Every structure is written in structure tokens, then in C-alpha cells.
């Protein structure tokens, strides 16, 4: 009886070990062509490295690499279960490499008490909303050679987290698009610092949804956006260092109270700032 129990248990352990090995084998770190740091899950940001001179593409789009082969790759909220890359070495030999992406489950968050005009905008505001999003797209359009993302990230302020990435949001009971930011509660006027160095691409006092909005470009198409601000401390086009004061917390736009909403984008993908902090702490 005892030995049977043992052997049953043993086969379970063996099956678990086999599944663990299979899972790991398909993962990035064990691939000789690409080394990775970061989180292979929806919303994750990855820092990869290939041999210098290697060309890399994903779904037919070339990925920008530094001279020493570093590159960024971002996974959106609903990223597919597998990411496929085409890696072409200096000699022109192309290899397809597949990586698994872990799925996440997102919670539902109900936000009551936001100004009703930001839930069902009056027809007269639609033009403004469209021109706001064109401004934001323009601010995020550049993919520069800067590599500020290589030095790691810090929190833009200390405060309790009141909203997370990916949540399905209901505003005043009305379902809206998911929340892509990390929300920190903090009193109006609290200083926000740059989580990493970069160039200010937007310092706008009043967008319809996000109110006072600041966008910092960390290079290679990676940017941070800060929403609902009460005051800008830097100007568009200026360069900021990590830890430098850039703005003050507010409750402008579609907000119920003073907080900072920090978002991160890599090209068209929205990534999770919480995962970025976890994966790329300052050394
Ligand atoms: Zn938010």
C-alpha cells in the first residue's frame, strides 16, 4: 500500500518535472540566437540581445537593434500565445525562432463619480477628442537611436497603487476600454519624477480624457506617459534625467481624485509599467 502510494506520487513528480523541462525548452533564455531579460507574459517588456550584425524581424517588421545587438520587444494586453521572430545572421542565414507568451487574467474595476461628460462626451467634443489622440500618436511616433531604457527604471513616485494594467473598466456603470496604466494615489501637487531618462515629447495642459499629459521618450519606440497632472515642470523637446522632477500630480481629465496614471508604450503595444519596474530595476 505504501509503495503504491509512493510510486503514484513519484510518477506525478516525474510528470511535473517533464512538463517543466518542456516549458523551459520553448522559452527564450535557452535559445542560442537571442538572449532575453524581462517577462514573457501579456503586457511584458523584453530586452533582447543578438550577435552584433544580426537582423531581426517580427511578423515581417524589422526590429531596431543597437550596435551591440540590444533591442526591445513589447507584448500587448492581448498578445498572442506565441511570438515568432526571424533571425538573420551576418552570413544571411535565416532562422525562425518561437517564444511562448503566458496569458494573464485581468480584473474588472468600477469607477464611480467621474464627470459624466467624460463618460458620454457631448457631440461637440468629438472633434477635440480626435485631435487629442492625433497629438498623442504624433508624440509617440518617433523611434530614435537613444538607449535610455538600458539603465533601468524607478517608480515615478511613492504612493499606494489604486489601479493596475489591463483591468476592464466601467465608468459610472458604462463599460469602456481597458485601463493600461499603473495608478498611484497621491495628493495634488506631489512631485512626479522621470522613471528613466529621455526626451519630453508632449507637455500638454489639458487633453479631454487625460487632462495634463506628459510623454517621455526613452528610445527605440519606448515611452512613458503621465496623466491627470496639475502642473508641468519640463518643456516639450527638453531632455530629462532619471529621478528628475517632471510634473505634479493632479486630477484633471477623466479622474475621480488626485492620482498619477503612468503608462508605457513600445511602438503600438501598451506594456505594463509594473512588469517593467520588476524586470528592469536600476542596478
Ligand atoms: Zn488610471
Image (spheres, rainbow, N blue to C red):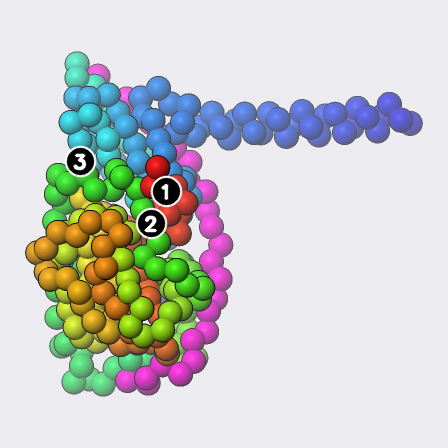
Which residue is labeled 1 in the image? 281
Whether residue 216 is visible to the viewer of this picture, yes or no, is yes
Which residue is labeled 2 in the image? 154
Residue at (18%, 44%) from the top-left corner?
219
Whether tag 1 and tag 2 are in contact, CB under 8 A, the answer is yes
**Local secondary structure at mark 3:** loop
Give the mark nearer the N terminus: 1 vs 2: 2
Q: Nearer the viewer, residue 62 or 153?
A: 153
Crowd rating for badge 3 (residues with CA inside 10 Å; few <14, some 14–19, many 20+):
some
Q: Is residue 58 left or right of residue 13?
A: left
Give the mark nearer the N terminus: 1 vs 3: 3
Give the mark nearer the N terminus: 3 vs 2: 3
Find the distance from the CA under tag 3 to the CA under tag 2: 24 Å
**Residue bounds of the magenta highlight:** 93-117
Whether tag 3 and tag 2 are in contact, CB under 8 A, the answer is no
Is the residue marked 3 within 8 Å of ligand 1, measured from its CB? no
Q: Position of residue 143 (x, y in %)?
A: 14, 45
Q: Position of residue 16 (x, y in %)?
A: 63, 30
Q: Is residue 62 magenta?
A: no
Which residue is labeled 3 in the image? 64
Q: Position of residue 125 (x, y in %)?
A: 18, 81
Residue at (21%, 19%) from the top-left corner?
89
Q: Is residue 99 magenta?
A: yes
Residue at (26%, 52%) from the top-left corner?
243
Q: In the rendered image, which quarter is residue 92 located in?
A: top left
Amino acid at each position: 500500500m505504501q509503495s503504491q502510494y509512493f510510486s503514484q506520487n513519484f510518477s506525478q513528480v516525474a510528470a511535473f518535472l517533464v512538463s517543466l523541462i518542456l516549458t523551459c525548452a520553448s522559452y527564450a533564455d535557452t535559445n542560442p540566437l537571442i538572449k532575453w531579460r524581462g517577462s514573457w507574459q501579456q503586457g511584458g517588456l523584453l530586452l533582447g540581445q543578438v550577435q552584433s550584425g544580426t537582423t531581426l524581424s517580427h511578423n515581417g517588421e524589422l526590429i531596431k537593434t543597437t550596435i551591440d545587438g540590444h533591442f526591445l520587444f513589447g507584448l500587448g494586453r492581448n498578445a498572442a500565445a506565441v511570438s515568432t521572430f526571424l533571425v538573420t545572421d551576418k552570413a544571411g542565414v535565416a532562422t525562425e525562432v518561437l517564444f511562448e507568451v503566458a496569458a494573464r487574467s485581468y480584473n474588472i474595476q468600477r469607477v464611480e463619480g467621474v464627470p459624466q461628460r467624460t463618460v458620454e462626451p457631448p457631440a461637440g467634443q468629438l472633434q477635440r477628442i480626435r485631435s487629442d489622440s492625433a497629438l498623442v500618436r504624433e508624440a509617440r511616433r518617433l523611434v530614435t537611436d537613444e538607449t535610455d531604457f538600458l539603465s533601468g527604471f524607478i517608480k515615478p513616485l511613492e504612493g499606494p497603487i489604486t489601479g493596475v494594467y489591463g483591468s476592464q473598466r466601467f465608468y459610472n456603470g458604462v463599460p469602456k476600454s481597458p485601463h493600461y496604466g499603473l495608478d498611484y494615489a497621491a495628493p495634488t501637487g506631489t512631485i512626479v519624477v522621470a522613471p528613466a531618462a529621455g526626451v519630453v515629447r508632449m507637455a500638454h495642459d489639458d487633453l479631454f480624457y487625460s487632462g495634463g499629459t506628459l510623454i517621455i521618450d526613452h528610445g527605440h519606440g519606448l515611452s512613458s506617459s503621465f496623466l491627470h497632472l496639475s502642473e508641468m515642470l519640463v518643456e516639450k523637446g527638453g531632455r530629462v534625467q532619471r529621478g528628475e522632477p517632471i510634473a505634479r500630480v493632479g486630477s484633471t481629465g477623466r479622474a475621480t481624485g488626485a492620482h498619477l496614471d503612468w503608462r508605457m508604450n513600445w511602438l503600438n503595444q501598451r506594456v505594463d509599467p509594473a512588469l517593467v519596474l520588476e524586470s528592469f530595476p536600476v542596478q
